[in-house]
Amino acid sequence: MAMTIAEKILARASGRSTVAAGDVVEPRVDLAMSHENGALVINQFREIYAGTGIEARVWDPSKIAIIFDHRVPAESAKTATNQKRIREFVAQQGITKFHDIRADQGGICHQILPESGYVLPGSVVVGTDSHTTTHGALGAFAFGIGATEMASVWALGVALNIEVPETIKVIVKGTMPEFVAPKDLILHLIGCLSSEGANFKVFEFHGEAIRNMPTSGRLTLSNMAVEAGATAGIVPADSETGRYLREVAGYKGEIDLVQPDADAKYAQVVEIDCSQLTYQIACPHTVDNVKTIEMVEGTKVDQIVVGSCTNGRADDLAVAASILRGRRIADGVRMLVFPASWRIYRESMKRGVLEDLVNAGAIIMNPGCGCCLGVHQGALGDGEVALSTTNRNFLGRMGNPRAQVYLCSPAVAAASALTGCISRPPKGLTRHESAFQFPAPENDACVEAG
């Protein structure tokens, strides 16, 4: 039977020769990830063993990863106490893939996993975070689960009652125009399909543009697959996957470049010519409320955010720095930059990227998810408008239901920081240029968001 990538991975992990969409399986888990919500998982895990007289031990401590990233450093006594409990549990269970609040090992979970070599093609990855879909960029079947489901994974090493999903094949042709980014591509796809257009399905990304895309961009695509309702977003592993695992993650073992069968059955095929793509903006308060930049250009903004698990990688920061280099952020605008990991932070610092951002007036924050989630650092005031490279703009995101959040690419975010309103990046600029002409608009060019 011909199979998609998701079907192949789930068949192998379930000890079966074939599976088809609709089958219910219990696949073996290769990696189980949690962040601070690991405290909830610990409660559920211990409940499984309560009253049995059996010592509560995880099935395989080498296959569990826990990363502190949502509230770092701790913003309250409650958070600090939960983090303390997790540290104690990690030590007790012998969990080695633990990333504490340290500049030599920390960062956002969806960056730490790939750059540490924890995710391999063909593996099954589960995480207590909806954006666990990110790791499909490396050819894995990666999806989010709840704390109760994760507790059973910790105990048994398998994911229970998983229905094999249908797959949507996305074929991306052509070459992206200057500064148009993978973020624009995935926003365009979500806008076309809607936030429910891929419910309980898998995106499988193909085409010339995907083959030529670095892993950083693939991570962006898979990260936001869930915003269309997808269970997972998978990029077939190829030579770029191998390069990333060897050169970035330092992985030295075997790599299985799992591919779909040529005659695999797909629920839908979507074709996109990215050479015709322009800058995309997700407008309040849903990610699928996507418009081209022409439709919202000039909207006044109060806060710019560059970073997160979606667009906090080294090349994202470099793009923003190339636009800001030698210039100054507009008065009345705050710009916050969140590198996705401390490794990226250090790399960007060595290359002068952070210096360019700071000289322009940006604030460099420690890696973390707090601003995106709205629980720690960077909250918005009543009536304020944010333009962000994060992945969600729901009402109340960034900590205030009386504020508005627009989503965009790093290039658009940086260009808008210079003008104080949603703006397109300048033409003819490369990230290596040291100076350029980018005049700010007149004061009345910015309009209030409505």
Image: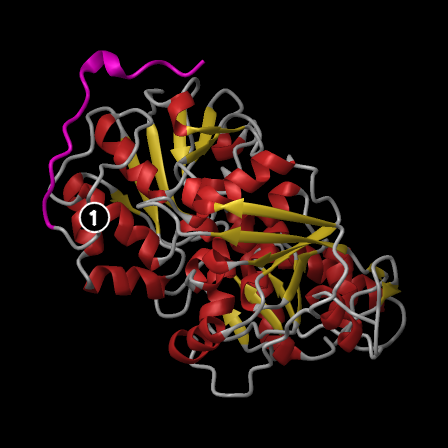
Q: Mark yes or no: residue 104 visible.
A: yes
**Apparent side of residue 81 relative to residue 344 in the rendered image (left or right):** right
The boundaries of the magenta stretch are: 434-450
Q: Which residue is mark 1?
A: 322
Q: Quadrant of the C terminus?
A: top left
Q: Quadrant of residue 36?
A: bottom right
Write the residue at 49% across / 27% down: 283
Number of residues whose C-alpha sits closer than 10 Å to that of mark 1, classed few (under 14), some (14–19) or many (20 or more): many
Q: Is residue 389 above or below residue 33?
A: above
Q: Quadrant of residue 443?
A: top left
**Colour theme:** secondary structure
Q: Mark yes or no: residue 69 visible.
A: no
Check residue 135 for magenta coloring. Answer: no
Q: Quadrant of residue 27?
A: bottom right
Write the residue at 21% across / 55% down: 353
Residue 39: x percent and y percent? Answer: 64, 57
Q: Quadrant of the N terminus?
A: bottom right
Q: Is residue 162 above or below residue 296?
A: below
Q: Is residue 272 above or below residue 256?
A: above
**Apparent side of residue 184 relative to residue 89 in the rendered image (left or right):** left
Task: Tell me which secondary structure the magenta stretch mostly adopts.
Answer: loop
Seen from the viewer's position, the closer of residues 351 and 7 is 7
